[in-house]
Amino acid sequence: MNTKQHDCIVATIESPLGPLVIGALPAGVCLLEFSTPVRLDSQLETLRRQLRCNTVPGDHPHLEQLRAELAAYFDRRLTTITVPLVIAGTTFQERVWNALLEIPYGATCSYEDLARNVGVDRGQRAVGHANGSNRIAIVVPCHRVINKSGKLGGYGGELWRKRALLRLETGGTLLDFDA
């Protein structure tokens, strides 16, 4: 990890699922979080500590690209978001988050399968914890991980949003769900 301090430029954008807080460093997007205060405060503090950065309001080309790609995603015109990412966590978290990026649009994976994919048999709980620590929601698609039984399980952005994202990706619309 680069120890040189940079400012993380943050902004708030509207989405069909509520306000999102987005953040970028020179290398890429490092934050996309629903604006739930308790979770957001924790994620911002972790981001500042792990990336050794300050968070300041503003705009950045990576944020502009993310805005455009998210709009196309929510309109079902884009299945792969390509904005550069800054994924920083523990070695294990990064393995899990990179494995999440391999789950195809419209598909799901169980916590058990994800644990197996990152080389930790019976590591569902550890994978679930890493999944819950993801700071780049939607783009690093933690919403695509479900329980082995097919039930949704947890989601930092609340289960109704997880359900909405999965329905959107499987041909429905964001309005096809019960909040």
Image (cartoon, grey):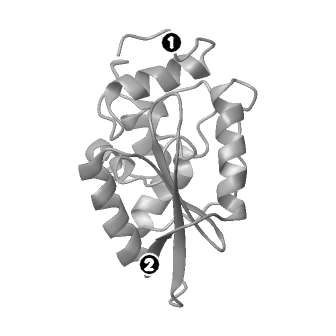
Question: In which quarter of the view is residue 83 placed?
Answer: bottom right
In the rendered image, residue 152, in percent from the top left (x then y), is placed at: 35, 24
Vertical order, 26 against 111 (above or below): below
Crowding at mark 1 (Cα within 10 Å: few <14, some 14-19, many 20+): few
Secondary structure under tag 2 reads strand
Vertical order, 23 against 56 (above or below): above
Query: Residue sitting at 72 percent across and 43 percent down?
Result: 68
Relative to the observer, which residue lies in front, 108 or 35? 35
The amino acid at mark 2 is Asn
The amino acid at mark 1 is Leu
Query: Which mark, residue 175?
Result: 1
Query: Residue sitting at 52 percent across and 78 percent down?
Result: 7
Residue bearing mark 2 = 54
Quadrant containing the C terminus is: top left
How many numbered badges does the structure rendering display? 2
Q: 160 left or right of 21?
A: left
